[in-house]
Amino acid sequence: MGLPVRQQVIYWGIAAAVFLLALWGMGSVLLPCLMGGAIAYFLDPVADRLTRTGMSRAAATTLISLFAVLIFVLLALLVVPMLSRQLVALVNDIPNIFNRLQGFLSARFPQLLEPDSVVQQTLNSIGRTIQSKGGALASSVLSSALSVINAVVFIVVVPVVAFYMLLDWDQMVERIDGWLPRDHQTTIRRLARDIDAALAGFVRGQVSVCLILGTFYSITLMLAGLNFGLVVGAIAGLVTFIPYVGVLIGGSLAIGLALYQF
C-alpha cells in the first residue's frame, strides 16, 4: 500500500529541496558533468541508430567520439582563428563604416547632418565610442568567453564525461527506471516520454537548425566575397532560434557590410 498523498508531498518536497541545495553548493563542480550529460543526451539517438545497424554500443560511442574530436580540431585550427581575426577587423573598421555612412547621408540628406542635428551628434558619439573602446571590447569579449569556462574543462573533462555517459546512457535510464515508485511507474514513464519527445525535438531541432544555417550563411557569404562573412554567418546562426530575428539581423549586417565593401 502506498503512502498517503500528504506524506508523499512532504517527502518529495524535502528531497527536491536537498537536491536543489546540493546543486547550488556544487555548481562549479557539476558544470562539466551537466555539459557532458547534455552532449550525451544530444548524441544518444545517433548511438542508438548505429547500434541498430549491428555495431556494439562501445564501437558506436567510440566512432561518435572520434568524429566529434575531428570536428573540434578542425574548428580549433581553422574556424576559431579566422572568426577571431574577422571580429577584431570588423570592430576596428567600424569607424570607417560610420564615416562612409555619414558621407552618404550628407550627400543624399544634407538636412539630417547639420552640426546641431540629432543624427549628426549620435553618429559622432557612436563613432568616437567605438573607435576608443571597440578593439578593447572585442578582445575582452574573446578573453572573457575563454575564461568563463576553462579550456581544460572543454578539452579533457567534458569529452571524457560525455563519452562514458553516452556509453552507459541506456543502463542509466534503466537504473533510474528501477527507482520509480511502483504505484506511479506507469504515469511517470508516460510523462517522461512526453517530456523527452518535446524537449528532444525542440533542443536537437533548434541546435541543428542553428548549426546548418550558420554554416550555410558563412560559406555562401565568404564565397560571395564578403570580408566579414564568417562573423555575419555566426551571428545569424546563433540567433536563428528566435523567429525572424536571425534573418533580419543577418540580412541587415550582410547588406550593410556589402554596401560598405563594394
Image (cartoon, rainbow, N blue to C red):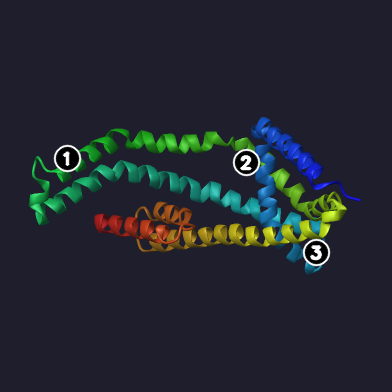
Choose the circle earlier in sequence order: 1 or 2: 1
Q: Which residue is pictured at 54% across the width and 50% down the height?
A: 75
Spatial distance from mark 1 to mark 2, Cα to Cα? 45 Å
Percent of width and height locating residue 253: 33, 55
Q: 10 Å neighbourhood of mark 2: few (<14), some, or many (≥20)?
A: some
Spatial distance from mark 3 to mark 1, Cα to Cα? 66 Å
Percent of width and height locating residue 126: 25, 40
Q: Which kind of residue does numbered mark 3 sit on?
A: Met
Q: Which mark is residue 121?
A: 1
Choose the circle earlier in sequence order: 3 or 2: 3
Q: Secondary structure at mark 1?
A: helix
| Residue at image mark 3 | 55
In the displayed structure image, the side of residue 41 where residue 74 appears, left or right: left
Q: Which kind of residue does numbered mark 2 sit on?
A: Phe
Percent of width and height locating residue 15: 76, 38
Q: Which residue is pictured at 75% across the width and 55% down the height?
A: 61
Taking the view exactly as shown, the residue that stands out farthest to the right is 1
Choose the circle earlier in sequence order: 3 or 1: 3
Q: 10 Å neighbourhood of mark 1: few (<14), some, or many (≥20)?
A: some
